[in-house]
Amino acid sequence: MSELDTAGHGYCLLSALLQYPEPELLAELPQLERYLQNTLPRWHGALAELLTHLRRSALIDLQLQYVMTFDRNPSHSLHLFEHIHGESRDRGQAMVDLLAEYSKHGLQMVGNDLPDYVPLFLEFLSQLEADEAERMLGDAIHVLAFVGRKLRANGSPYACVFDLLQTLTPVQAEELSEPPVRDMDEALETFGPGADGIEPLLAPVMGGVHPVNFYPKAAAPQRH
């Protein structure tokens, strides 16, 4: 079985690795590593830095480091659109478009995660045909690579996940411009909730479903 054929399971694995560390993850780590060694050996090598970190660290330390890495540092945020749109109105439309893409492929969201949460996005890729997953990953790779570079610059073992993702698409990641600087309170003050009480950043825009844009329009991806 080729790497392409098993990538769906691999995306699920990457999704698990990027979530808040729980006892279940550490308990399943030996089985996870065996799967990688036997099925996706290149992935196992690429993820060695993070796997070793998870194996050798206490759970409480892993959880504290995770919070400090992803929740306390906006440049490491695991929400894709935050790196493109900040808290601007465009982020709301991007969320709506991504939700429509999920629904089109039969994925119904449960829980409180936003649709642009990277582990959820990877879970979505795992349910697609290989060529469609590669296309969607290619669209998002500019943002994923940006996060990976920030993590690598700060010495985070999680950077290897994003390094690996860049090898799974022929699209070359481009630099991102800084997102608009505006927090949610300022956006609400500027636009105000609608008559239906829906916050403007979450309200769908008239005109039907739009293509999902994971990168600024001026920086369309180039395939090689």
Image: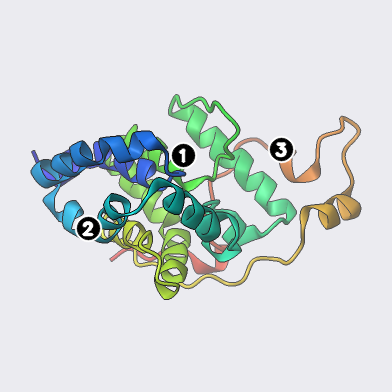
Instruction: Decide if residue 77 is in sight here.
Output: no
Q: Residue at x 66, y 45 (%)?
A: 93
Q: Looking at the image, is mark 2 or mark 3 nearer the viewer?
A: 2
Where disc 3 sits, the SS reads loop
Residues under labels 3 and 1: Cα distance? 21 Å
Q: Which residue is mark 2?
A: 48
Q: How many marks?
A: 3
Q: Which residue is mark 3?
A: 204
The answer to which of marks 1 and 2 sits earlier in the sequence is 2
- In the rendered image, residue 169, in percent from the top left (x then y), is placed at 29, 56
Q: Are marks 2 and 3 in contact (CB under 8 Å)?
A: no
Along the viewing direction, whichever of 184 and 222 lies nearer the viewer:
184
Q: Residue at x 18, y 52 (%)?
A: 44
The answer to which of marks 3 and 1 sits earlier in the sequence is 1
- In the rendered image, residue 36, in percent from the top left (x then y), is placed at 17, 44
Along the viewing direction, whichever of 112 and 222 lies nearer the viewer:
112
Q: Residues within 10 Å of mark 2 (few under 14, many from 20)?
A: some
Q: Residues within 10 Å of mark 1 (few under 14, many from 20)?
A: many
The circle on residue 111 is none
Q: Residue at x 54, y 59 (%)?
A: 68
* Residue kind at label 2, given as amino acid type: Ala
Q: Looking at the image, is mark 1 or mark 2 nearer the viewer?
A: 2
Q: Quadrant of the C terminus?
A: bottom left
Q: Are marks 1 and 2 in contact (CB under 8 Å)?
A: no
Q: Which residue is mark 1?
A: 120
Residues under labels 2 and 3: Cα distance? 42 Å
* Residue kind at label 1, given as amino acid type: Leu
- In the rendered image, residue 155, in percent from the top left (x then y), is placed at 40, 71
Q: Quadrant of the N terminus?
A: top left
Q: Looking at the image, is mark 3 or mark 1 nearer the viewer?
A: 1
